Amino acid sequence: QVQLVESGGGLVQAGGSLRLSCAASGSIFSFHTMGWYRQAPGKQRELVATITNGGNTNYADSVKDRFTISRDNAKNTVYLQMYSLKPEDTAVYYCNLIQGIVPKNYWGQGTQVTVSS
């Protein structure tokens, strides 16, 4: 089993910045991908950014050039640095880890990010 604990959400004005953190613990394989997804009210959960254990990253077009995903492998922690936040970034942000030959997803409890205009 894998446990994911997020932190760092909150309320920020448009144009501001926030950093989310997600600490993973438990049975983590050497090869895995961690990432952030978000879900706004009335919308489906969507990918924000992912990073492999080797450091390869992938971003949603809507956050490219504004968000940066990074990780500290020694701490099994992934970060999402968010700049130039917009009201449409308002959502619950979920940490994700996927691993295994038969891929298995693990999710954090979610952290609320609210961007006021």
Image: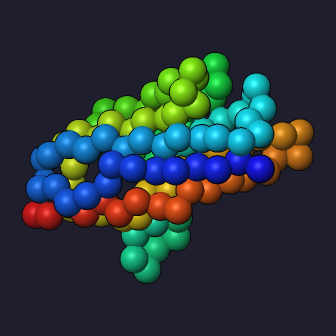
Picture quadrant where residue 24 is located: top right
Between residues 32 and 64, which one lies in front from this camera angle?
Answer: 32
The relative height of residue 14 versus residue 27 in the rendered view (above or below) is below
Which residue lies at the image location 50% right of the left edge and 24% below the top edge? 72
Q: Position of residue 89 (x, y in %)?
A: 30, 57
Picture quadrant where residue 61 is located: top left
Q: Position of residue 30 (x, y in %)?
A: 76, 25
Between residues 78 and 40, which one lies in front from this camera angle?
Answer: 78
Q: Single out the residue that lies furthest toward the bottom.
A: 42
Q: Single out the residue that lies furthest toward the right.
A: 101
Which residue lies at the image location 52% right of the left edge and 50% below the top edge? 5
The relative height of residue 117 versus residue 66 in the rendered view (above or below) is below
The reply to whether residue 15 is in sight is yes
Which quadrant is home to the C terminus?
bottom left
As drawn, is 65 to the left or to the right of 7? Answer: left
The reply to whether residue 59 is in sight is no
Which residue lies at the image location 63% right of the left edge and 29% below the top edge? 52
Which residue lies at the image location 25% right of the left edge and 63% below the top edge? 114
Q: Single out the residue that lies furthest toward the front.
A: 26
Q: Position of residue 108 (x, y in %)?
A: 56, 56
